[in-house]
Amino acid sequence: MIGWVVLGIGGSCWQRQVDGHSAADPYITQGDRFYMQRSDPEKLDQAIQAWQDGLLVVPEDVTLLSRLAQAYTTRALSNPDHSPDGFIVAREHGIRCLKTDTFLAGVAQTYGGRLVPRALRTVDVTLIDCLIWTSISWSRWLQLHGAAGASLDLEIVASLAEKAVELSADHDRGRPLHALGLALSLPPAPLGPDLDAAEAALSAALEASPDRWWIEVDLAEMIYAPTDQTENVHALLSAVTARSPDAYPQEFLENRAAISHAEQLLSTGSSSGWKP
C-alpha cells in the first residue's frame, strides 16, 4: 500500500492539470481500486483498461504509465497466455514513461530510440517505478528467450535496476533490489555474470518482502541452479510449493504464479542446468 501512495503523489511536468489536480487522477483511483482486487484476473484486466482510458486523456502521465508497466508484467507473469507479448507491452509502457525525461528522450533519439546507460543520468525518483518495471519486464522477456547474444539488452536492463537502487533501494519494500538481482543473474556463463552480487540483491529483497515468493523462485532458478547448489534449489522450491497463496491476499495472484513455476521446476528442472 505504501508503494501505491508513493506512486500516487509522484508528479510529472507533463500532466494536464485541472483545478490543481491531474486529469489522470480519476483513472488512477479507479484502476488502483481494481488492481487491489487482482486476485480475480478480471479485476486486473479492468485496472489495465481504466489506466489505458486515462492515457487517452493524459498520454504522458508517469503514474499511469508506470502502473501499466507493472500491471502488464503481473498479468504476463501470472498467465502464460499473456507471455511473452505481455512483457513487451509492459516494457514499452515503461520506456515511454522514462522518455518523459527530456534528456533521456534526447539521448535515446540519437541512438535510434534505444536506451543507453548514460541517458539515465538525469532520471530522478519520480520515475523510479518506471525504472523498476522496465527492468523487470525486460528481464522476464530475456528469461523466456535466453540472454545469449543480447549483451546490449543486458547492459541497459542492469543499468535501469542499478539506477533505481541508487535512487531508493528500499522503495516499495525493496522492489529495486529484486529488479537488480534478477538483471544481474541473466548473463550466460561466458559473459561472466556477477552471481554473488545478484544473490546479495535478491536476498536483501527477500528480507524486505518475505511475502513475495517470486524472489525465492528466482534465487533457486537463477542463482542456486547454475551454481549446482541442488539442496538449496530443492529446499527453496519445496518451501514455496508447500504454501497457500491465501496467506497473503494482496500478493495472491503473483504468489500463485510463483507456486506454479516452482512446481514446474521441481518436475522438469530449469534451463539453467538444474535437474530434479
Image: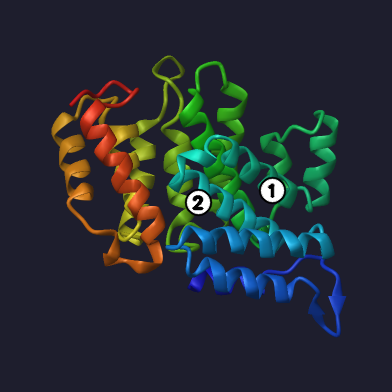
Report the front residue among 125 and 30: 30
Is residue 93 shown left or right of residue 144? right
Q: Which mark is residue 74?
A: 2
The quarter holding residue 48 reads: bottom right
Residue 19, placed above or below residue 94: below
Which residue is labeled 1 in the image? 93
- Which element carries disc 1, helix, strand or loop? helix
Q: Nearer the viewer, mark 2 or mark 1?
A: 2
Is the residue marked by circle 2 packed among few (<14), some (14-19), or many (20+) residues within 10 Å?
many
- Which residue corresponds to the image point at 86% horizontal and 70% vertical from the top-left? 16
Please give left or right for residue 52 compared with residue 79 in the image: right
Task: Write down the quadrant of residue 14 in the picture.
Answer: bottom right
The one of 161 and 239 positioned closer to us in this rendering: 239
Q: Nearer the viewer, residue 23 or 53?
A: 53
The amino acid on which the numbered mark 1 sits, given as a three-letter code, is His
Element assignment for label 2? helix
- Looking at the rendered structure, the kind of residue marked 2 is Thr
Mark pair 2, 1: CA separation: 13 Å
* Residue at 54% from the left image edge and 48% from the top image edge: 73
Choose the circle earlier in sequence order: 2 or 1: 2
